[in-house]
Image (cartoon, rainbow, N blue to C red):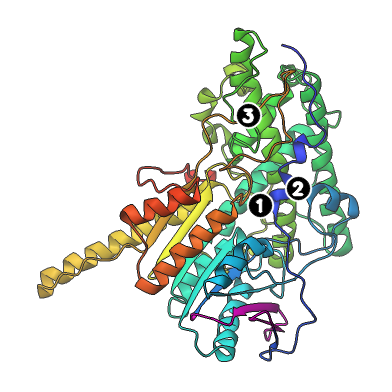
C-alpha cells in the first residue's frame, strides 16, 4: 500500500459544521414586549427582547399574507472559548445570543419567503447551550408578541435545526394550539440518547488515545472550565496525531504518543481503534468526503479492495469523530453545570454487545476478529465513568419528547449526520408510530361503541437526505480530495437553500390545509428540491442507547 498525503484540514473539515453561526446583525434590543420597528423597501424589521431578555427579530413584508415562520437556532457554546479552540471548531470565542430568523440568517432563504408574503422571526434565546426548556417559553411569548404587533396573523409555523429541531418538536407536542405546522430538522432527540452518543465517543477517545482527558465530572467553578477547555485541546490533539499517522501509513497507522494502551494492543492499527469507537458510539462510517466504498483507481486491484474495506471507513471515522468528541466535551460540561454533577455513566455498558453485529460487517476496518476481541477486552478492563444519581435525576426533569403530534409535522435529516445522527429522527418517528397506533385503536373502539368511525389522520411526514452510493474523490496521484464540498446526506444539517425552501412550502401547505402534502404533488416537490426522499420502507439505525 502506498502512502498518501492529506491536507491538514482533513480531521477538522466537519468540525466547523457542528454549529452554523452565520447570523443577522441587529441593533440593540428594545425592552420586553415593545418591539422597535423600522420599514425600508416595503419590509418591516422589528427587534426587541422577550421578558427573559432573549433578543428577537421579526421581518415582515408589506404584502404579509398572515403566515409567519418561527425559527429556532441550534446549539451554541454557553461559555467563552479560547481563541485556539475557536479557530479549530468554528465556534465563536464569545457566547452569542444574536437572533436567527431563518436558518443561518441566509438571505437566499428569507428573500423568497418575504417575496411570497410570508414573515419570518426568531429568538437568540436567553441562555445558550442545552436550553430547550427556557427556549420553549421564549418562543411561546414571542408568538404572542408577533400576533399583537401584526394583528392580521392567521398561521404560525415552527421550524428549527439541531437543538432547534428538538425545541420545535417539543413546541409542537406541548402547544398545538399555538402553531399550525412544524418542521424539526436534523433534530436532536431526548437528552440521554444524545449524551450517550457524545459521551461514548469522548470516553473512547480518552481510553484509547489520551487517558489524561478528564471526559466529565468536571470540578466546580473556574477549575472545571479549565478542565473542559483542556479536554477540547487534548481531543483535537489526539485527532491531529491520528490524522498525521493515517497520512504517513494508512494501512497500519501508529498510535499517538499520548496513548497508554498496552504494547500488545499497539500491534493493532490505531485506525481500527478509531473505527471501533465510532461503532460503539453510533457515529456514522460515512463522512463528508469518505463513503466507505471507494478506492483510488491508481491502486492495483487487490489494494483497491483493501482501501475500500479497511482504509476508507477509517478516514470516515476520523472525519466524523472530531465532531462527536468535541460535542461530548461541550454538552457534558454544559449539562453538568445545569444538573450539578456528573451525568455520563457507562459503568454498566456492554460495548461488546454494542458492536456484536457490526464487528463482522466492518471486520476489515477493525483488523479482524482477533484484533476486535483484544480491543473490546481492553475496554472491559479499564475504569468506567459513573454519574451522580442526583444529577441524573435532575436531568430527567428537563423537557423530553413524547412523539405525540396532533398538528402536521415534517422531519428531515441526513442519514450520515455525525452530530445528530439519523437515529434521533428515527426515534421520534417510532414514538409517533406508537401514538398513531393508539389513535387507530381508539377509533376502532369508538366505532364498536357508537357505530361512528373516523379514520385518524397521520400527522407525520418523514423525509431523508440520502448519501450517494459513491462520492469519495481522488487526486491524480490517488490521494482523497477533501477540498470538495461535503456530500449530500453528510455533515451536520447540511442542507441547501432549495431544500429549506421546499420544507417551507410544505409547511405552508400543511398549515393552510391541516394536513401534510402527499402523493404525486409531494414527490414532485421533493424531486425539484433535489436529494430529498420520502421512503416508507426506510428505517434509520437506532441510537445505541435504545439497544440497552
Q: Secondary structure at mark 1?
A: loop
Of the residues under marks 2 and 1, which one precedes in the sequence? 2
At horizontal 64% and vertical 25% (from top left) the residue drawn is 312
Q: CA distance from mark 2 to mark 3?
A: 33 Å
User: Which label belongs to residue 215?
Assistant: 2
Q: To which quarter of the image does residue 246 belong?
A: top right
At horizontal 60% and vertical 72% (from top left) the residue drawn is 133
At horizontal 75% and vertical 47% (from top left) the residue drawn is 215
Marks 2 & 3, CB-CB < 8 Å contact:
no
Q: Secondary structure at mark 2?
A: loop
User: Which label belongs to residue 37?
Assistant: none
Q: Is residue 65 magenta?
A: yes
Image spot of residue 468 (x, y percent) = 53, 35
The residue carrying mark 3 is 472
Q: In the picture shown, does residue 251 fall above or below 282?
A: above
Image spot of residue 149 (x, y percent) = 59, 90
Q: Is residue 528 magenta?
A: no
Marks 2 & 1, CB-CB < 8 Å contact:
yes
Of the residues under marks 2 and 3, which one precedes in the sequence? 2
Neighbours of disc 3 within 10 Å: few (<14), some (14-19), many (20+): many
462 to the left or right of 212: left
Q: CA distance from mark 3 to mark 1?
A: 35 Å
Neighbours of disc 1 within 10 Å: few (<14), some (14-19), many (20+): many
Specify the quadrant that holds the N terminus: top right
Question: Which residue is at the front of the view, 212 or 163?
Answer: 163
Q: CA distance from mark 2 to mark 1?
A: 9 Å
Q: Nearer the viewer, mark 2 or mark 3?
A: 3
Highlighted range, magenta: 40-66
Q: In the picture shown, does residue 232 fall above or below 311?
A: below
Amino acid at each position: 500500500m502506498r502512502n498518501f498525503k492529506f491536507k491538514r484540514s482533513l480531521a477538522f473539515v466537519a468540525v466547523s459544521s457542528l454549529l452554523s453561526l452565520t447570523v443577522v446583525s441587529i441593533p440593540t434590543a428594545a425592552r420586553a414586549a415593545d418591539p422597535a420597528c423600522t420599514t425600508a423597501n416595503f419590509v418591516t424589521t422589528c427587534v426587541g427582547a422577550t421578558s427573559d431578555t432573549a433578543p428577537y427579530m421579526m421581518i415582515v413584508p408589506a404584502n404579509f399574507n398572515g403566515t409567519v415562520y418561527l425559527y429556532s437556532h441550534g446549539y451554541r457554546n454557553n461559555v467563552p472559548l479560547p481563541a485556539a479552540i475557536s479557530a479549530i471548531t468554528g465556534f465563536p470565542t464569545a457566547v452569542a445570543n444574536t437572533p436567527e430568523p431563518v436558518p443561518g440568517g441566509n438571505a437566499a432563504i428569507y428573500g423568497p419567503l418575504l417575496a411570497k408574503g410570508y414573515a419570518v422571526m426568531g429568538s437568540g434565546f436567553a441562555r445558550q447551550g442545552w436550553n430547550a426548556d427556557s427556549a420553549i417559553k421564549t418562543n411561546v411569548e414571542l408568538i404572542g408578541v408577533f400576533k399583537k404587533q401584526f394583528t392580521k396573523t392567521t398561521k404560525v409555523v415552527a421550524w428549527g435545526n439541531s437543538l432547534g429541531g428538538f425545541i420545535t418538536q417539543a413546541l409542537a407536542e406541548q402547544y398545538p394550539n399555538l402553531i399550525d405546522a412544524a418542521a424539526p430538522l436534523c433534530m436532536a432527540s431526548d437528552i440521554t440518547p444524545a449524551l450517550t452518543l457524545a459521551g461514548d465517543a469522548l470516553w473512547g477517545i480518552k481510553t484509547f488515545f489520551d487517558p489524561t482527558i478528564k471526559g466529565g465530572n468536571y470540578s466546580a467553578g473556574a477549575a472545571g472550565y479549565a478542565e473542559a477547555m483542556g479536554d477540547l485541546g487534548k481531543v483535537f490533539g489526539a485527532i491531529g496525531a491520528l490524522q498525521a499517522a493515517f497520512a504517513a501509513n494508512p494501512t497500519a497507522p501508529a498510535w499517538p504518543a499520548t496513548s497508554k494502551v498496552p504494547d500488545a494492543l499497539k500491534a493493532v492499527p490505531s485506525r481500527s481503534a478509531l473505527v471501533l469507537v465510532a461503532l460503539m458510539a453510533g457515529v456514522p462510517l460515512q463522512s463528508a468526503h469518505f463513503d466507505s466504498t471507494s478506492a483510488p483507481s491508481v491502486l492495483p486491484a487487490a489494494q483497491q479492495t483493501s482501501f475500500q474495506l479497511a482504509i476508507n471507513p477509517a478516514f470516515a471515522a476520523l472525519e466524523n469523530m472530531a465532531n462527536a468528541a468535541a460535542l461530548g466535551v461541550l454538552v457534558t460540561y454544559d449539562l453538568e453545570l445545569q444538573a450539578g454533577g456528573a451525568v455520563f455513566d457507562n459503568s454498566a455498558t456492554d460495548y461488546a454487545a454494542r458492536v456484536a453485529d457490526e464487528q463482522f460487517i466492518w471486520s476489515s476496518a477493525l483488523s479482524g476478529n482477533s484484533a476486535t476481541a483484544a480491543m473490546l477486552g481492553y475496554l472491559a478492563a479499564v475504569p468506567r465513568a459513573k454519574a451522580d444519581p442526583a444529577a441524573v435525576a435532575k436531568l430527567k426533569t428537563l423537557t423530553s419528547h413524547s412523539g405525540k403530534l396532533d398538528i402536521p409535522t415534517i422531519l428531515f435529516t441526513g442519514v450520515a449526520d455525525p452530530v445528530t445522527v439519523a437515529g434521533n429522527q428515527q426515534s421520534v418517528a417510532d414514538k409517533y408510530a406508537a401514538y398513531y397506533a393508539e389513535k387507530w385503536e381508539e377509533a376502532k373502539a369508538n366505532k364498536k361503541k357508537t357505530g361512528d368511525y373516523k379514520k385518524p389522520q397521520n400527522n407525520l411526514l418523514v423525509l431523508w437526505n440520502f448519501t450517494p452510493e459513491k462520492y469519495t474523490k481522488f487526486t491524480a496521484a490517488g490521494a482523497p480530495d477533501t477540498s470538495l464540498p461535503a456530500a449530500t446526506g453528510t455533515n451536520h444539517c447540511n442542507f441547501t437553500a432549495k431544500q429549506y425552501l421546499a420544507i417551507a412550502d410544505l409547511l405552508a401547505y400543511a398549515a393552510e390545509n391541516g394536513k401534510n402534502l402527499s402523493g404525486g404533488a409531494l414527490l414532485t416537490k421533493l424531486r425539484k428540491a433535489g436529494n430529498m426522499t420520502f421512503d416508507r420502507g426506510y428505517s434509520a439505525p437506532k441510537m445505541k442507547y435504545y439497544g440497552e
